Image: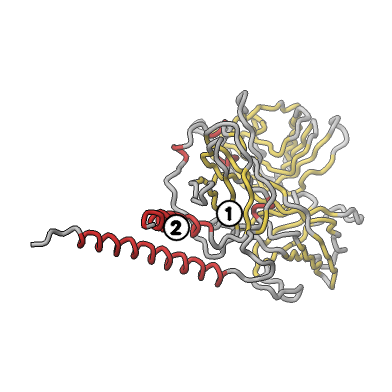
């Protein structure tokens, strides 16, 4: 009878700590079985992100016993870098006068978003216009006011300036630099910056797009007020605006993004300013900012005396992130999500310990489910804390019992003098 009681209490003492490691997590998702032992990437999808804090401090991976399995959060796109290179492009014409310098550069119809020019013996700060053409005769504006800021390139006296613009696929580019009575710039080379991809290299995405939210726009006075309601609390650190064609071809408007500071907010009280940016016909209509998981946010566009811009959609994006973890093919694992009391775990796992990061396979996850101990609509913070203290108390009682029995048995075995 004593042996059975000991075994039961020992089992209880082992069970309690593992139970404490999963207490307080409101949601979980199974990790699909893997083919072999090794490291795997678990992609943190928008659906998973909607159930964790923006610092991922409440993300855990547990095994069959409910114990944490160390994982490493990573941005693969930033780790796998390509070798930068500049491809020279032919300057097919150059016209110089006291009023302007005009160059036509031939491309190859591939999509590009930059041009690099090399100057001889010049450091300057001017502006230029950039046009594109498919056949070299009809020209279309890409940007009519790009600053030219030169940087010293080498000891030979050469310097570079770069022009960045939304991706286009024109075959010809024309750059016009007003001289306004100044001496012209001696441009000796033109090129396009890019990267080299090595054969067999895995290409990781840079970002993930979240499901599109509901948009409400109200135009009042000189401001367009826009509210976006996301289907869930997705992480996002970038937005992109899609505009309707309402006849406004050339525009450059000031815009602001607001994140609500609490549960109460409106167009009159949108919350905290998260980003200021421009909305123009020459821009990408995108802006980045500190990551947020707000269900609702606001964008204000200042139209001044112009016709309002009609926004048809605002997309949100988050960085492509993975949790790298070692899995056994015979094991069963779960993601534990959404614990307001959780803090960032301290694991020994680091990049040096996971080997070749480009060959890590992806471990799929199943549907996210609410933990059986949770009741929808009930705040779980107090209940989670109570459960943890109860488990600690039970563990202390169990350890106290074993200590008492050990001391008692030792006293019984002392020789009588």
* Residue ID at (65%, 63%): 274
- The residue tagged 1 is 336
**Could you classify mark 2 by the number of other residues whose Cα lies within 10 Å: few (under 14), some (14-19), or many (20 or more)?**
some
Color theme of the render = secondary structure
Percent of width and height locating residue 224? 81, 67
* Residue ID at (75%, 76%): 268
* Residue ID at (68%, 73%): 263
Q: CA distance from mark 1 to mark 2?
A: 22 Å
* Residue ID at (65%, 29%): 189
Q: Residue furthest right?
A: 247
In this view of the protein, which residue sits in the foreground, 186 or 284?
Answer: 284
Between disc 1 and disc 2, the foreground one is 2
Q: Can residue 121 be seen by looking at this rendering?
A: no
In this view of the protein, which residue sits in the foreground, 254 or 39?
Answer: 39
Quadrant of the rendered structure where residue 207 is? top right
Q: Residue furthest top?
A: 199
Q: Are marks 1 and 2 in contact (CB under 8 Å)?
A: no
- Secondary structure under tag 2 reads helix
Percent of width and height locating residue 313? 82, 55
**Could you classify mark 1 by the number of other residues whose Cα lies within 10 Å: few (under 14), some (14-19), or many (20 or more)?**
many
Q: Quadrant of the N terminus?
A: bottom left
Q: Which mark is residue 12?
A: 2
Give the answer, above or below, for where 210 lies relative to 223.
Answer: above
């Amino acid at each position: 009878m004593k042996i059975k009681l000991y075994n039961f209490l020992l089992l209880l003492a082992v069970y309690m700590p593992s139970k404490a490691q999963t207490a307080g997590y409101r949601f979980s998702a199974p990790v699909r079985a893997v083919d072999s032992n090794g490291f795997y990437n678990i992609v943190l999808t928008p659906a998973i992100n909607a159930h964790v804090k923006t610092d991922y401090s409440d993300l855990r991976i547990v095994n069959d016993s409910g114990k944490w399995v160390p994982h490493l959060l990573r941005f693969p796109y930033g780790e796998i870098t390509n070798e930068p290179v500049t491809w020279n492009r032919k300057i097919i014409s150059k016209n110089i006068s006291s009023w302007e310098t005009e160059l036509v550069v031939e491309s190859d119809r591939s999509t590009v978003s930059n041009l690099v020019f090399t100057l001889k013996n010049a450091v300057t700060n001017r502006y230029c216009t950039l046009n594109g053409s498919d056949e070299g005769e009809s020209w279309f504006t890409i940007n009519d006011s790009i600053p030219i800021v030169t940087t010293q390139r080498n000891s030979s006296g050469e310097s570079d300036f770069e022009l960045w613009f939304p991706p286009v696929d024109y075959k010809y580019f024309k750059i016009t630099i007003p001289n306004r009575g100044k001496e012209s710039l001696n441009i000796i080379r033109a090129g396009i910056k890019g990267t080299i991809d090595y054969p067999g290299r895995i290409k990781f995405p840079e970002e993930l797009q979240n499901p599109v939210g509901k948009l409400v726009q109200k135009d009042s006075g000189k401001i367009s007020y826009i509210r976006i309601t996301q289907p869930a609390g997705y992480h996002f650190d970038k937005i992109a605006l899609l505009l309707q064609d309402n006849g406004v071809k050339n525009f450059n408007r000031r815009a602001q993004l607001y994140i609500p500071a609490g549960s109460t907010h409106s167009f009159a009280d949108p919350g905290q300013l998260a980003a200021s940016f421009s909305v123009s016909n020459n821009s990408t209509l995108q802006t980045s900012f500190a990551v947020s998981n707000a269900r609702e946010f606001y964008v204000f566009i200042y139209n001044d005396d112009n016709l309002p811009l009609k926004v048809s959609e605002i997309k949100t994006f988050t960085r492509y992130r993975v949790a790298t973890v070692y899995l056994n093919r015979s094991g069963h694992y779960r993601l534990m999500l959404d614990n307001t009391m959780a803090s960032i775990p301290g694991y020994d796992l680091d990049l040096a310990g996971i080997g070749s990061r480009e060959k890590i396979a992806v471990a799929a996850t199943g549907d996210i489910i609410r933990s059986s101990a949770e009741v929808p609509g009930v705040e779980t913070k107090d209940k989670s804390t109570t459960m943890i203290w109860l488990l600690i108390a039970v563990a202390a009682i169990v350890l106290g019992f074993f200590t008492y029995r050990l001391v008692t048995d030792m006293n019984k075995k002392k020789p009588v003098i």
